[in-house]
Image (cartoon, helix red, strand yellow):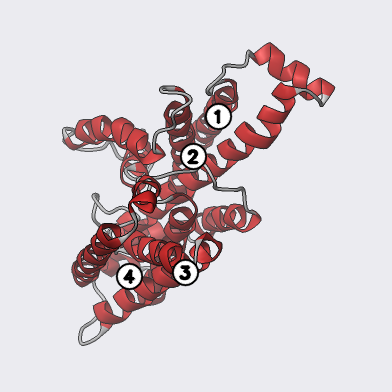
């Protein structure tokens, strides 16, 4: 069994990296693979510039973003023991969006990322505080609190869009639908992704027990309350890192973990890393389609992930059960 899971992980990792590398060829202008190798060998020319300064950095951002969303969704589904949980269920994206859009109107784009983190941070802390206040922390209270906060923030976002100048409104809506045009590779997001992978490996047994219920986890000596808080904040931070850079990219965190579970993988030390590779590839493919199908016009990447994710989700919902392995 161990050999089979490791082989499946290596196969998924290799396929994901191959597909992502292949996407470098596509864009507003297709570049043959032979030309890519020649450009990399020469280190100069127009193709070299396009590959190294435009396409490769964007593919890296898309891959890391998709990986973070998939891992966040996987952890939250374990925390809430809800198969329909996704990274935005607590209103995190709404808090970050409110901070970014408010900053764009009042201060300009220079402070948008800072205020995006502030807005999301306030939501993360507020939801945790309200969900725990007056009652024990439990998944149902957490979900209801998140939905309530998200509804209120979405109303404020709608108000900002209505009152914003017409010249800014289109750009705001485009960003909210997912846009990686101006996103840049950042070392700390890669470190965050690796940290989540290591967390899933080190605490894999505890996460497996958590997915079966808090009572089962307590029975094997897991500090359930501390682990729940840690999962909540780690998954939330992963979602925030994506939202402040590229807007709300939907369906990745919801669909990808179930795709991996359909292979018979349930142990978190394999489930989370495999979700990262598949989620990263999904966003890379979606972003490649978004900038290629109607080139030179670029579509929001969130539109493409929805078009890919909806049929997959419908298929998954029609499955009666997953084969445990």
State the CA–CA distance, disc 3 to disc 4. Answer: 42 Å
Residue underneath mark 3: 115
Question: Mark 4: which secondary structure?
Answer: helix
> Contact, CB < 8 Å: mark 1 with mark 2?
yes
Residue visible at 46% across and 49% down in the picture = 246
Residue underneath mark 2: 280
Q: Percent from the top left, x then y, of residue 63?
A: 53, 40
Residue underneath mark 1: 20
Sequence-wise, the earlier of marks 1 and 2 is: 1
State the CA–CA distance, disc 2 to disc 4. Answer: 35 Å
Determine whether, in the image, residue 10 is placed left or right of residue 41: left
Residue visible at 61% across and 32% down in the picture = 55
- Foreground residue among 7 and 107: 107
Circle 4 residues within 10 Å: few <14, some 14–19, many ≥20: few
Which of labels 3 and 4 is toward the front?
3
- Foreground residue among 204 and 297: 297
State the CA–CA distance, disc 1 to disc 2. Answer: 8 Å
Residue furthest to the bottom in view is 134
């Amino acid at each position: 069994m161990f050999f089979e899971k490791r082989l499946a992980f290596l196969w998924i990792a290799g396929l994901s990296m191959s597909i992502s590398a292949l996407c470098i060829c596509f864009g507003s202008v297709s570049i043959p693979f032979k030309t890519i190798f020649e450009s990399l060998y020469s280190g100069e020319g127009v193709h070299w510039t396009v590959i190294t300064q435009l396409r490769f950095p964007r593919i890296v951002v898309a891959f890391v973003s998709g990986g973070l969303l998939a891992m966040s969704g996987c952890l939250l589904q374990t925390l809430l023991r809800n198969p329909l949980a996704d990274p935005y269920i607590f209103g995190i994206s709404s808090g970050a969006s409110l901070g970014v859009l408010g900053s764009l109107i009042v201060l300009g784009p220079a402070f948008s990322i800072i205020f995006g983190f502030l807005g999301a941070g306030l939501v993360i802390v507020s939801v945790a505080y309200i969900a725990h206040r007056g009652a024990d922390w439990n998944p149902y209270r957490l979900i209801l609190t998140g939905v309530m906060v998200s509804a209120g923030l979405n109303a404020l976002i709608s108000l900002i869009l209505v009152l914003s100048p017409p010249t800014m409104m289109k750009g705001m809506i485009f960003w909210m639908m997912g846009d990686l045009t101006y996103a840049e590779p950042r070392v700390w997001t890669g470190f965050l992704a690796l940290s989540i992978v290591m967390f899933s490996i080190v605490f894999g047994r505890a996460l497996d027990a958590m997915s079966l219920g808090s009572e089962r986890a307590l029975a094997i000596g897991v500090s359930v309350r501390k682990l729940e808080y840690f999962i909540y904040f780690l998954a939330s931070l992963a979602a925030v890192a994506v939202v402040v850079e590229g807007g709300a990219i939907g369906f990745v965190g919801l669909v990808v973990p179930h795709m991996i579970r359909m292979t018979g993988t349930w142990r978190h030390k394999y489930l989370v890393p495999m979700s990262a590779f598949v989620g990263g590839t999904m966003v890379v493919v979606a972003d490649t389609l978004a900038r290629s199908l109607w080139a030179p016009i670029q579509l929001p990447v969130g539109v493409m992930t929805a078009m890919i994710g909806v049929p997959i989700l419908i298929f998954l919902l029609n499955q009666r059960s997953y084969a445990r392995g």
